[in-house]
Image (tube, helix red, strand yellow):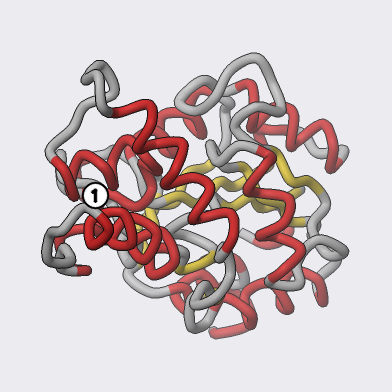
Amino acid sequence: MTQNIAAVFFDLDGTLADTAPDLAAAANRLVVERGHAPVSYEKLRPVASHGARGLLGAAFGLRPEDAEFPALRDTFLDYYEADIAVHTRLFDGMPQVLSALEAAGIPWGIVTNKIARFTVPLVAAIGLAPRASAVVSGDTTPHAKPHPAPLLHAAACAGADPHHCIYVGDDLRDIQAGKAAGMITVTAAYGYCGEGEPPEAWGADHLVHHPAELIPLLFPAAVT
């Protein structure tokens, strides 16, 4: 596949970086402050890609239309911003994937629905800001995923034809956005993946269970 790849883009939360521990910590800080026992990490992790909506839903049973939601959301976001990269790390194997792309001269970037308020400091904190050819947040374009606009913007930033780009993500909307943009799609089944349809049902072109599986997918000649 290598000879046809113009660029590779990654979702951030649950695909490139394991951000769930810091997101869960912010949610549980709210839970404990309100006199409740912390919510298990196993309950919070699958919804981490959905930010405040997912985490407050899992922790408090709240929906965005509930009266209590806006104030809790704002406090949650403040707590998360203050400790945005305490436990967050790249997933095991992902540093090697990024290094292999760079060695091959293939640009890579990040396309996330996380707004720039959080994306910019987080990407800087984990040392990726100077290396990414594009960092597209949920509020960079007028539309967020599953709309293709963020991915098309990333491709333009990288100077790449979208039809020769790959998008890797751990949520159904990632695959929907990638397909709408004309990109090859890869489901990161090791990620958070939500609580809806199983990743195998999303219709991606490829599915991986560990970042290391991206290496033979991207560079098949290197492992033959």
| Percent x, y of residue 63 | 21, 26
Location of the N terminus by quadrant is bottom right
| Percent x, y of residue 69 | 29, 28
Location of the C terminus by quadrant is bottom right
| Percent x, y of residue 34 | 21, 52
Viewer-closest of 217 and 89: 89
Residue at left 34%, top 52%?
Answer: 48
Residue at left 39%, top 36%?
Answer: 73
SS category of the residue bearing label 1: helix
Q: Is residue 37 above or below residue 159?
A: below
Q: Is residue 30 above or below residue 158?
A: below
Q: Is residue 190 above or below residue 151?
A: below
**In screen coordinates, is 143 left or right of 58?**
right
What count of labels does the image hold? Answer: 1
Viewer-closest of 97 and 194: 194
Give residue 188's quadrant in the image.
bottom left
Using a 10 Å C-alpha cutoff, classify the residue at mark 1 as few (fewer than 14 neighbours), some (14 to 19) or many (20 or more).
many
Residue at left 27%, top 39%?
Answer: 202
Viewer-closest of 217 and 169: 169
**In screen coordinates, is 115 left or right of 200?**
right
Viewer-closest of 38 and 122: 38
**In screen coordinates, is 207 left or right of 214?**
left
Amino acid at the residue labelled 1:
Pro
Q: Which residue is mark 1?
A: 199
Q: Is residue 37 above or below residue 222?
A: above
